[in-house]
């Protein structure tokens, strides 16, 4: 019984049959953390005492003969951008190094109510800005498959920790690919639902019209189970849709016979590694063999998605990062400075990392008078065109497939001194954030990187129409069954 | 298109980032490269296209206008979380 092998449904079955206790599951996860975290650095804060308390409470229920829910007694971790009352929340930044929130994220409250067992707050790129988990002020996360390679980002901590069993699932965020890309690099399932279906209350914001919460787990069924528990309207989040939550357990049972699967030709980008392309085309082949109807489609504005993202996201970042001024919370300079502007400038220069600074400045620039129309307003219009591509294509097909990333995990340090090269890692994932459409990454084999000898995981990306969580899960589960 | 060190200085002031001279030069190069990349959007024909600000189609989401009370311990925490506080008030710099 190991947390790196058990799925949530297996864990639940085992708890009900009394094959093991919730405390044993928690201790197993904490054990993995103790052994592997010094190497892969996926956890920033370990919540061992809390985990033991929460699992003991569930064991009491089981002993009393009470029935337990699907997530009850199951250990998990949270990306360290979710407010957890009384538990340090850092956003992997010096700005919030010692910050103890006085309130809980809505999703955390839901998981507490569902009997979840929190084992850790996991590492991320600083304020979730990055594609490799190398910008964290707490050190990079190493890929468990090859520790000389990155875990991916920004949710490197959640993806790597789930891959090795530091909990059976993770809650993370995806603004430009931050759930899907690390999931594909680490060989786990990562789902970014439709923008607005999961409450963002308590999530430290990066780009407010793009940020989306989502689960990372080892199987599609597990991801569906977690989604079922955390989705729902929230009066505390004005961007959270008030829609009924569908039955995802039903969706993952359906097969993919007759499913119309679109393959956008623009998704096979220049520079895609041959090993990745091979794995993706093989995945599409097996979907065809299982009865899916493969349709070649075109999404002509695909090449504009990345530049659109790198105008809109930094603009929103510059606004969201303004709150870190050393007045109400977070780092404040110890230098004796009387002038309030100089005080803010010193405080922020001292504590904010380079990538975050870059994005704040790009955002400030594109929003400033003289640049606003040519950059920001134009990007908002191109955003409309990108959304239009999705609306058009979903008249013809049910889902879209392609690679999550044009490459497998690259080496640590390889892209960290070239910001633009790092941004290109998001090229296949950002469209789904711009349009707010649901997208999942499912493992589809491995590929040898051009500069290494260890085969690395490849992720198949499946994108659905807005509020199409069910069809995405159906396609993903259907592929997962035949991919085995 | 090049962004000059002077442009960075202006932007850094707007963004309240107290950059050093070395940082200013470094960021001018890096941000210059990124702006050159995103500039390609200017070639896209967007005549008659409306901007998209958000994708939820939600409009004017409101709540009932009533007072919600905090636990005193949480209220206290909000004050003591401030780096400069005297227990009851958050201390701020004088704004001139």
Image (tube, coloured by chain):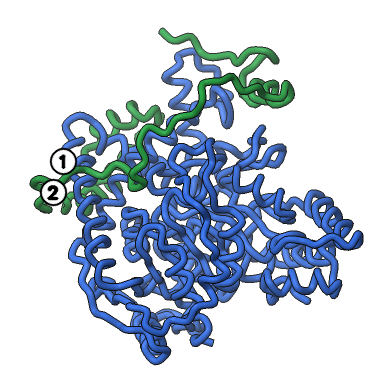
Marker disc for residue A251: none
**Residue located 41% across and 58% down the image:** A467
Residue A271, given in percent of the width and then of the height, sits at 28, 74
Query: Quick one: B79 or A293, which is closer to the camera?
Result: A293
Q: Is residue A178 above or below residue B69?
A: below
The colour assigned to chain B within the rendered structure: green
Query: Quick one: A292 or A156, which is closer to the camera?
Result: A292
Instruction: Note the chain letter of the blue one.
Output: A
Q: Is residue A27 left or right of residue A289?
A: right
Q: Residue furthest right?
A: A64
Q: Residue furthest bottom?
A: A289
Q: Is residue A450 visible?
A: yes
Query: Quick one: A41 or A346, which is closer to the camera?
Result: A41
Q: Quadrant of the C terminus of chain A?
A: bottom right
Residue A259, given in percent of the width and then of the height, sits at 37, 79
The residue tagged 1 is A374
User: On the same chain: label 2 and label 1?
Assistant: no
Q: Residues within 10 Å of mark 1 (few under 14, many from 20)?
A: some
Q: Quadrant of the N terminus of chain A?
A: bottom right
Q: Is residue A278 visible?
A: no
| Label 2 SS | helix
Based on the displayed image, in which of its 4 quarters is residue B68 positioned? top right
Subunit that carries the residue with mark 2: B
Based on the displayed image, in which of its 4 quarters is residue A279 positioned? bottom left
Query: Quick one: A163 or A290, which is closer to the camera?
Result: A290
Asked if the residue at tag 1 contacts the one at tag 2, i.e. Cβ–Cβ closer than 8 Å, the answer is: yes
**Residue located 22% across and 74% down the image:** A297
| Label 1 SS | helix
Based on the displayed image, in which of its 4 quarters is residue A329 positioned? top right
The residue tagged 2 is B42
Q: Residues within 10 Å of mark 2 (few under 14, many from 20)?
A: some
Residue A434, given in percent of the width and then of the height, sits at 32, 53
């Amino acid at each position: 019984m190991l947390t790196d092998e058990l799925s949530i449904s297996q864990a639940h079955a085992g708890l009900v049959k009394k094959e093991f206790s919730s405390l044993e599951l928690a201790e197993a996860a904490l054990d993995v953390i103790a052994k592997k975290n010094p190497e892969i650095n996926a956890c920033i804060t370990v919540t061992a005492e809390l985990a033991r308390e929460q699992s003991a409470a569930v064991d009491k229920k089981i002993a009393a003969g009470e029935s337990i829910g699907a997530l009850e007694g199951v250990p998990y971790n949270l990306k360290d951008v979710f407010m957890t009352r009384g538990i340090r929340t850092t956003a992997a930044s010096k700005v919030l190094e010692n910050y103890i929130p006085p309130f809980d994220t809505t999703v955390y409250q839901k998981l507490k109510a569902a009997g979840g067992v929190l084992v850790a707050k996991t590492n991320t790129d600083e304020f979730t800005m990055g594609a490799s988990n190398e910008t964290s002020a707490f050190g990079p996360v190493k890929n468990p498959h090859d520790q000389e390679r990155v875990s991916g980002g920004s949710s490197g901590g959640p993806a790597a920790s789930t891959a090795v069993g530091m909990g059976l699932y993770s809650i993370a965020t995806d603004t430009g690919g931050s759930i899907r890309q690390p999931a594909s690099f680490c060989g786990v399932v990562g789902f970014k639902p439709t923008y607005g279906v999961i409450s963002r209350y308590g999530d430290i914001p990066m780009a407010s019209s793009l940020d989306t919460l989502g689960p990372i787990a080892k199987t599609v069924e597990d991801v569906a189970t977690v989604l079922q528990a955390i989705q729902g309207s929230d009066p505390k989040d004005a961007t959270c849709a008030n829609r009924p939550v569908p039955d995802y357990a039903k969706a993952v049972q359906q097969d993919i016979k007759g499913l119309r699967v679109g393959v956008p030709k623009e998704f096979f980008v220049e520079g895609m590694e041959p090993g990745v392309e091979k794995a993706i085309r093989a995945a599409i082949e097996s979907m065809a063999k299982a009865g899916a109807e493969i349709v070649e489609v075109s999404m002509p504005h695909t090449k504009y998605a990345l530049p659109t993202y790198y105008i809109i996201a930094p603009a929103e970042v510059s606004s969201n990062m303004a709150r870190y001024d050393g007045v109400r919370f977070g780092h404040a300079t110890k230098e004796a400075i009387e002038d309030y502007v100089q005080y803010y400038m010193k405080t922020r220069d001292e504590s904010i990392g380079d990538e975050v600074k870059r994005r704040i400045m790009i955002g400030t620039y594109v929003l400033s008078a003289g640049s606003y129309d040519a950059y920001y307003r134009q990007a908002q219009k191109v955003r409309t065109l990108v959304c239009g591509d999705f609306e058009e294509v979903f008249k013809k097909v049910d889902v879209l497939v392609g690679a999550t990333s044009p490459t497998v995990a690259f080496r640590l340090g390889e892209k960290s001194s070239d910001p633009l090269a790092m941004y290109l890692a998001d090229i296949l994932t950002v469209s789904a954030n711009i349009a707010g459409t649901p997208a999942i990454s499912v493992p589809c084999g491995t590929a040898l990187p051009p500069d290494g000898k260890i085969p690395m995981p490849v992720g198949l990306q499946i994108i659905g129409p807005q509020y199409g969580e069910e069809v995405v899960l159906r396609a993903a589960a259907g592929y997962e069954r035949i991919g085995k | 298109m090049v962004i000059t060190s002077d442009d960075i200085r202006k932007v850094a002031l707007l963004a309240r980032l107290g950059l050093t001279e070395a940082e200013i030069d470094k960021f001018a190069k890096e941000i210059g490269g990124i702006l050159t990349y995103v500039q390609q959007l200017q070639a896209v024909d967007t005549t008659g296209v409306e901007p998209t600000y958000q994708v939820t189609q939600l409009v004017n989401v409101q709540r009932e206008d009533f007072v919600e009370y905090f636990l005193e311990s949480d209220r206290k925490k909000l004050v003591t979380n401030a780096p400069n506080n005297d227990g009851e008030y958050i201390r701020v710099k004088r704004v001139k």
